[in-house]
Every structure is written in structure tokens, then in C-alpha cells.
Image (tube, helix red, strand yellow):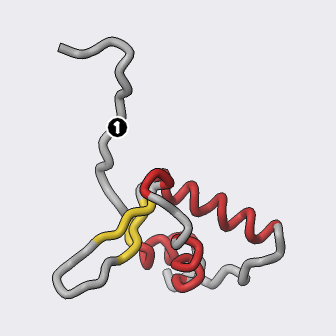
Amino acid sequence: MRQSGGLTLSAITSVFTITYVAEMLGEDVDWLHELSIDMFSEDGCLRVYGVGEDGVPAFTEYGIECLKQIIADKRAAGGAPPPIQSTK
């Protein structure tokens, strides 16, 4: 039985590693890592751990949108490196 007035959240079905997102956005992975330090799980930024790894930042689709906004804000303020050329 479902409670009325309850909060319904959609499940996260995929996350994208910071390296993948950097390539997709044409941005420097080290710079994105700096930006992700201040992001939280509520912002769609998670850490993915593997065997022998310290953890890699990964983003949900919402996290990528938040990161895009952070990038735009940094560029508008003049505090961002230029985009890099994609290797694809």
C-alpha cells in the first residue's frame, strides 16, 4: 500500500565517470575534478570504487547538468580554462 503525500524518487540507472564526462564536454579532466570537489550526492556527484582504487568521481545525468552550470558560471566569471578539443 502506498502512502499518500509521500515523496517518490526515480532510481539512478547509470553514472558516468569523470573521464567520460570530460571527453563528452570537451573539458580538462583535472579541472573538472577540482570543480567536483564541492559537489555532493544531492548534486548528482558520486564516487565509484573498484578493486585497488581510491575512488573515481562519477556523475548522474543530473550531475552532468549541474556540472555544466558550474562550468558556465566559472566561464562567465572569467575563471575557467578554455575548452579542449575532443579526440573523437
x and y percentages locating residue 38 in the rendered image: 56, 67
Horizontal side, residue 35 vs residue 88: left or right: right
> Eyeballing the image, is 4 above or below 31?
above
Circle count: 1
Q: Residues within 10 Å of mark 1 (few under 14, many from 20)?
A: few
Q: Residue at x 56, y 81 (%)?
A: 86
Q: Nearer the viewer, residue 72 or 25?
A: 72
Horizontal side, residue 49 vs residue 33: left or right: left
Q: Residue at x 23, y 16 (%)?
A: 2
x and y percentages locating residue 73 in the rendered image: 74, 63
Quadrant in which the N terminus appears: top left
x and y percentages locating residue 48 in the rendered image: 30, 70
Q: Residue at x 32, y 48 (%)?
A: 12
> Eyeballing the image, is 28 above or below 42?
below
Q: Quadrant of residue 66?
A: bottom right
Horizontal side, residue 74 vs residue 86: left or right: right
Amino acid type of disc 1?
Answer: Ser
- Please tell me whether mark 1 sits on a helix, a strand or a loop: loop
Q: Quadrant of residue 54?
A: bottom left
Q: Residue at x 33, y 12 (%)?
A: 4
Horizontal side, residue 26 vs residue 17: left or right: right
Q: On the image, numbered disc 1 is attached to which residue?
A: 10
